[in-house]
Image: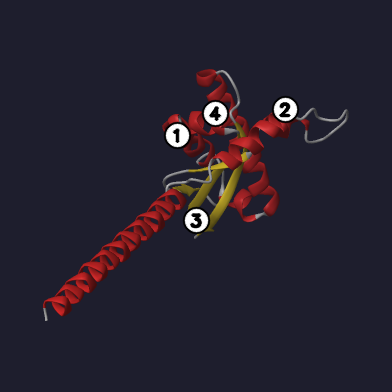
Amino acid sequence: MAAGKGKDLEIADGSGKKKKLIIIGAAVGVLAIGGGAFLMMSGGSEPAPMEAEVAAEGAAPAEGDATAGANKGSALYVTMPRPFIFNVPGATKDRLVQIKVQLLVRGSNNEETAKVHIPLVESTLLRTFSTSNAEQLITVEGKEELKKKALREVQDALTGVAGSEVVEDVLFTGFVMQ
Protein backbone atom coordinates (compact mmCIF):
# COMPACT_ATOMS: atom_id res chain seq x y z
CA MET A 1 0.00 0.00 0.00
CA ALA A 2 2.78 2.35 0.85
CA ALA A 3 4.25 1.85 -2.60
CA GLY A 4 0.88 2.62 -4.16
CA LYS A 5 0.57 5.87 -2.24
CA GLY A 6 4.02 6.90 -3.38
CA LYS A 7 3.02 6.53 -7.03
CA ASP A 8 -0.14 8.60 -6.48
CA LEU A 9 1.94 11.30 -4.86
CA GLU A 10 4.44 11.21 -7.73
CA ILE A 11 1.68 11.54 -10.36
CA ALA A 12 0.15 14.46 -8.48
CA ASP A 13 3.50 16.30 -8.43
CA GLY A 14 4.00 15.70 -12.18
CA SER A 15 0.56 16.99 -13.13
CA GLY A 16 1.04 20.06 -10.90
CA LYS A 17 4.21 20.96 -12.80
CA LYS A 18 2.37 20.49 -16.09
CA LYS A 19 -0.42 22.78 -14.93
CA LYS A 20 2.09 25.43 -13.89
CA LEU A 21 3.85 25.19 -17.25
CA ILE A 22 0.54 25.50 -19.10
CA ILE A 23 -0.48 28.53 -17.02
CA ILE A 24 2.92 30.20 -17.51
CA GLY A 25 2.80 29.46 -21.25
CA ALA A 26 -0.71 30.93 -21.53
CA ALA A 27 0.35 34.04 -19.58
CA VAL A 28 3.37 34.56 -21.84
CA GLY A 29 1.15 34.13 -24.90
CA VAL A 30 -1.39 36.66 -23.62
CA LEU A 31 1.40 39.15 -22.84
CA ALA A 32 2.93 38.67 -26.30
CA ILE A 33 -0.42 39.21 -28.01
CA GLY A 34 -1.14 42.24 -25.81
CA GLY A 35 2.28 43.72 -26.53
CA GLY A 36 1.85 43.22 -30.26
CA ALA A 37 -1.59 44.82 -30.16
CA PHE A 38 -0.19 47.77 -28.18
CA LEU A 39 2.57 48.33 -30.73
CA MET A 40 0.11 48.22 -33.61
CA MET A 41 -2.30 50.63 -31.91
CA SER A 42 0.37 53.08 -30.74
CA GLY A 43 1.87 53.49 -34.19
CA GLY A 44 4.58 50.89 -34.20
CA SER A 45 4.65 51.27 -38.00
CA GLU A 46 5.81 54.92 -37.90
CA PRO A 47 9.42 54.24 -38.91
CA ALA A 48 8.27 53.22 -42.40
CA PRO A 49 6.88 56.69 -43.32
CA MET A 50 10.00 58.34 -41.85
CA GLU A 51 12.15 56.14 -44.08
CA ALA A 52 10.03 57.11 -47.08
CA GLU A 53 10.38 60.78 -46.13
CA VAL A 54 14.17 60.48 -45.84
CA ALA A 55 14.30 58.66 -49.17
CA ALA A 56 12.16 61.37 -50.78
CA GLU A 57 14.40 64.11 -49.35
CA GLY A 58 17.53 62.36 -50.58
CA ALA A 59 16.21 61.78 -54.10
CA ALA A 60 17.55 64.28 -56.61
CA PRO A 61 14.78 65.59 -58.89
CA ALA A 62 15.33 65.30 -62.61
CA GLU A 63 15.77 68.52 -64.57
CA GLY A 64 12.45 69.93 -65.68
CA ASP A 65 10.66 67.61 -63.26
CA ALA A 66 7.31 69.14 -62.30
CA THR A 67 7.47 67.41 -58.90
CA ALA A 68 10.79 68.95 -57.91
CA GLY A 69 9.10 71.02 -55.19
CA ALA A 70 7.13 68.01 -53.98
CA ASN A 71 10.24 66.05 -52.98
CA LYS A 72 10.51 67.87 -49.64
CA GLY A 73 8.96 64.93 -47.80
CA SER A 74 5.89 62.79 -47.66
CA ALA A 75 2.46 64.38 -48.12
CA LEU A 76 0.66 64.89 -44.82
CA TYR A 77 -2.74 66.44 -44.13
CA VAL A 78 -3.56 68.76 -41.25
CA THR A 79 -7.28 68.92 -40.55
CA MET A 80 -8.71 72.18 -39.31
CA PRO A 81 -10.42 71.41 -35.99
CA ARG A 82 -13.75 73.05 -36.93
CA PRO A 83 -15.56 73.78 -40.17
CA PHE A 84 -15.68 77.44 -41.21
CA ILE A 85 -19.22 78.83 -41.03
CA PHE A 86 -19.85 82.34 -42.34
CA ASN A 87 -22.35 84.55 -44.20
CA VAL A 88 -21.76 85.81 -47.72
CA PRO A 89 -23.79 88.51 -49.47
CA GLY A 90 -25.82 87.53 -52.51
CA ALA A 91 -27.69 89.50 -55.19
CA THR A 92 -31.10 88.62 -53.75
CA LYS A 93 -30.27 87.38 -50.25
CA ASP A 94 -27.36 86.53 -47.99
CA ARG A 95 -26.20 82.92 -47.87
CA LEU A 96 -24.75 80.78 -45.12
CA VAL A 97 -21.63 78.82 -46.12
CA GLN A 98 -19.85 75.96 -44.36
CA ILE A 99 -16.42 74.83 -45.56
CA LYS A 100 -14.35 71.97 -44.13
CA VAL A 101 -10.64 72.44 -44.79
CA GLN A 102 -7.49 70.33 -44.71
CA LEU A 103 -3.99 71.60 -45.36
CA LEU A 104 -1.54 69.65 -47.50
CA VAL A 105 1.99 69.89 -46.11
CA ARG A 106 5.22 68.06 -46.92
CA GLY A 107 7.23 66.45 -44.13
CA SER A 108 6.69 66.14 -40.42
CA ASN A 109 8.42 69.47 -39.66
CA ASN A 110 5.87 71.38 -41.75
CA GLU A 111 3.06 69.33 -40.21
CA GLU A 112 4.15 70.33 -36.69
CA THR A 113 4.58 73.97 -37.72
CA ALA A 114 1.08 74.04 -39.24
CA LYS A 115 -0.42 72.46 -36.11
CA VAL A 116 1.29 75.00 -33.85
CA HIS A 117 -0.08 77.89 -35.93
CA ILE A 118 -3.67 76.62 -36.40
CA PRO A 119 -5.20 79.74 -34.76
CA LEU A 120 -3.34 81.95 -37.25
CA VAL A 121 -4.40 79.73 -40.16
CA GLU A 122 -8.04 79.71 -38.99
CA SER A 123 -8.09 83.48 -38.67
CA THR A 124 -6.52 83.95 -42.09
CA LEU A 125 -8.92 81.51 -43.75
CA LEU A 126 -11.99 83.03 -42.12
CA ARG A 127 -10.91 86.52 -43.19
CA THR A 128 -10.31 85.28 -46.74
CA PHE A 129 -13.57 83.32 -46.94
CA SER A 130 -15.68 86.19 -45.65
CA THR A 131 -14.55 88.46 -48.51
CA SER A 132 -16.28 86.23 -51.07
CA ASN A 133 -19.86 86.53 -52.35
CA ALA A 134 -22.60 84.02 -53.16
CA GLU A 135 -22.40 84.48 -56.94
CA GLN A 136 -18.69 83.68 -56.85
CA LEU A 137 -19.13 80.56 -54.69
CA ILE A 138 -21.89 79.08 -56.84
CA THR A 139 -19.48 78.38 -59.70
CA VAL A 140 -16.65 75.86 -59.79
CA GLU A 141 -14.29 78.56 -61.02
CA GLY A 142 -15.25 80.77 -58.08
CA LYS A 143 -14.49 78.00 -55.60
CA GLU A 144 -11.12 77.33 -57.26
CA GLU A 145 -10.30 81.05 -57.14
CA LEU A 146 -11.19 81.11 -53.42
CA LYS A 147 -8.92 78.10 -52.78
CA LYS A 148 -6.02 79.79 -54.59
CA LYS A 149 -6.57 83.05 -52.70
CA ALA A 150 -6.79 81.14 -49.39
CA LEU A 151 -3.52 79.32 -50.18
CA ARG A 152 -1.70 82.59 -50.96
CA GLU A 153 -3.00 84.24 -47.78
CA VAL A 154 -2.10 81.26 -45.55
CA GLN A 155 1.37 80.97 -47.09
CA ASP A 156 1.97 84.70 -46.59
CA ALA A 157 0.83 84.54 -42.95
CA LEU A 158 2.99 81.50 -42.17
CA THR A 159 6.01 82.95 -43.96
CA GLY A 160 5.80 85.96 -41.66
CA VAL A 161 5.70 83.79 -38.53
CA ALA A 162 7.56 80.57 -39.39
CA GLY A 163 9.93 81.82 -42.10
CA SER A 164 8.60 79.45 -44.79
CA GLU A 165 5.35 78.81 -46.67
CA VAL A 166 4.75 75.50 -44.78
CA VAL A 167 1.44 74.74 -46.60
CA GLU A 168 1.50 73.36 -50.14
CA ASP A 169 -2.26 73.38 -50.78
CA VAL A 170 -5.58 74.25 -49.14
CA LEU A 171 -8.14 71.50 -49.74
CA PHE A 172 -11.91 71.89 -49.37
CA THR A 173 -13.15 68.56 -48.03
CA GLY A 174 -16.69 69.80 -47.47
CA PHE A 175 -18.61 72.71 -48.99
CA VAL A 176 -22.24 73.61 -48.21
CA MET A 177 -24.04 76.81 -49.16
CA GLN A 178 -27.65 77.55 -48.16
Q: Which residue is mark 3?
A: 93
Which circle marks residue 58 in the picture?
Answer: 2
* Residue at mark 4 to residue at mark 3: CA–CA distance: 44 Å
- Mark 4 surroundings within 10 Å by alpha-carbon count, few (fewer than 14), some (14 through 19), many (20 or more): few
Q: Nearer the viewer, residue 35 or 55?
A: 35
Q: What number is the disc on residue 171?
A: none
Above or below, 19 relative to 167: below
Camera-nearest label, 1 or 3: 1
Q: Where's residue 20, x and y in %?
A: 26, 63
Residue 3, image quadrant: bottom left
* Quadrant of image for the N terminus: bottom left
Tell me residue 50's x, y (percent): 59, 36
Tag count: 4
Secondary structure of the residue carrying numbered label 4: helix
Rounded to the nearest whole Å, what is the CA distance between mark 2 and mark 3?
Answer: 54 Å
Where does label 4 land, which residue?
109
Q: Which one is earlier in the sequence, the residue at label 2 or at label 3?
A: 2
The three-letter amino acid code for the residue at tag 4 is Asn
Please identify, in this view, whether the residue under mark 1 or under mark 2 is nearer the observer. 2
Query: How many neighbours does mark 2 have within 10 angstroms: few (below 14), some (14-19), or many (20 or more)?
Result: few
Q: Amino acid at mark 3?
A: Lys
Q: CA distance from mark 1 to mark 3?
A: 32 Å
Does dot 3 land on a helix, a strand or a loop?
loop
* 145 horizontally vs 78: left or right: right
